[in-house]
Amino acid sequence: MKIYCDYPTPWLATFQDPATPYMEGLINLHHDIMFILFILSGLVFWMLGKTVYSFDHQKNPVPSKVVHASTLEIVWTILPSVVLVFIALPSFTLLYSLEGTGHMSILITKMQLENLLPLTAI
């Protein structure tokens, strides 16, 4: 039995073992978002199938004369925003936990500045 810890293997379909707690948080966030995605995809495909099955011209030869459904419009406007908030809250939590982890410094030398910004004669 081989145990691979923090080592990518060929044809690996999932994430490798996390080395830091931040990567573990990213993996958990990915799994949460994928769960929400599969639930929403299943709901959308069920609604599409139900619509195609129910609104057959042989079953319902006279179409409905309803033009506006205010309640439906409110629901399909508010529901995606609620789903986005449920996705945003854990991602912002993870993002703010990463904020103070390391400091980065950039050193720019005179030679690099001359290559980036050529000076012209005045």
Image (cartoon, rainbow, N blue to C red):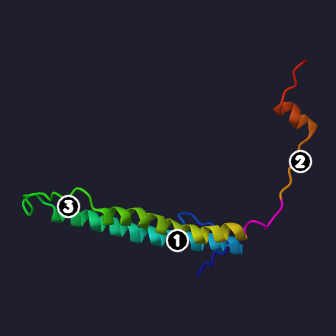
* Spatial CA span between label 3 and label 1: 30 Å
Q: Relative to 63, is 68 on the left or the right?
A: right
Instruction: State whether residue 36 is above or below residue 114.
Output: below
Q: Relative to 29, is 6 on the left or the right?
A: right
Q: Residue at x 34, y 61 (%)?
A: 73
Q: Which residue is mark 2?
A: 107
* Crowding at mark 1 (Cα within 10 Å: few <14, some 14-19, many 20+): some
Q: Which residue is mark 1?
A: 86
Question: Which circle, 1 or 2, is nearer the viewer?
Answer: 1
Pick whichever, 104 or 92, lies toward us: 92
Q: Relative to 115, is 57 on the left or the right?
A: left
Amino acid type of the residue tagged 3 in the rendering: Val
Tell me, yes or no, if residue 17 can be seen here: no
Q: Position of residue 9 (x, y in %)?
A: 59, 66
Q: Position of residue 39 (x, y in %)?
A: 40, 71
Magenta highlight range: 98-103
